[in-house]
Image (cartoon, rainbow, N blue to C red):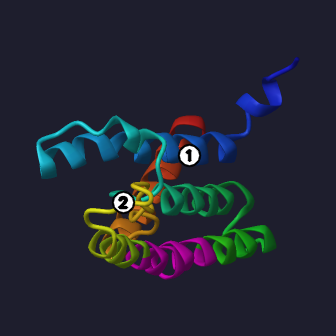
Amino acid sequence: MNLDPLISNHVLLSLLAAWVVAQALKLPLEYLRTHRWNWSLLVRAGGMPSSHSALVTATAQAVGLHAGFDSPIFGLAVAIAMIVVYDATGIRRQAGMQAQKINILVDELLSGHPVSDKQLREVLGHTPLEALGGVLLGVVVAQLFWFIWR
């Protein structure tokens, strides 16, 4: 299998790097906040910075740098990025807050008589600050890749 097209695709490499860096940054940032290592953050959604926001922003930035900020494909990348960031800070965040409330209700209703101890995932979306962290990270990573391979 010839990997040259994948290796030379700077947009793809930029977005993958932004996603990996965002996921990896969640570990030390969470440790600083809680003084506990939470290795599950490497593969989970939610937390600071938003890997979804970093990925789509790096994609849009890299597309703009490589295809031009006046290209239709850049406009499409920005539109997709806006939808993903909106979803992460809006719909997914609200779903996480609802899961938190449902978990409290279940704990109260079933105290002493647990039917199921499986909790709903409460960290599904992002706060605006977490999304902004991902957006900034995405721009920085794409820009670094642009300077390296230009």
Identify which amino acid the numbered label 1 is placed on: Trp
Q: Find disc 1 in the rendering and name its residue.
A: 146
**Location of residue 43 with respect to 84 vertically, above or below:** above
**Location of residue 70 with respect to 41 vertically, above or below:** below
Taking depth in this image into account, of 45 and 96 the one nearest to the observer is 96
Q: Is residue 30 magenta?
A: no
Mark 1–mark 2 contact, CB under 8 Å? no
User: Can you name the residue that lies furthest to the right here?
Assistant: 1
Element carrying mark 2: loop
Q: Which mark is residue 114?
A: 2
Horizontal and vertical percent for residue 141? 47, 48
**Location of residue 91 with respect to 36 vertically, above or below:** below
Horizontal and vertical percent for residue 110? 33, 69
Q: Main secondary structure of the magenta part?
A: helix
**Going 53% across and 80% down the picture, which residue do you hit?**
91
Q: Nearer the viewer, mark 1 or mark 2?
A: 2
Identify which amino acid the numbered label 2 is placed on: Pro
Q: In the rendered image, which quarter is residue 24 located in?
A: top left
Taking depth in this image into account, of 96 and 130 the one nearest to the observer is 96
Query: Circle 2: is it few (<14), some (14-19), or many (20+) Cα within 10 Å?
Result: few
The residues colored magenta run 82-98
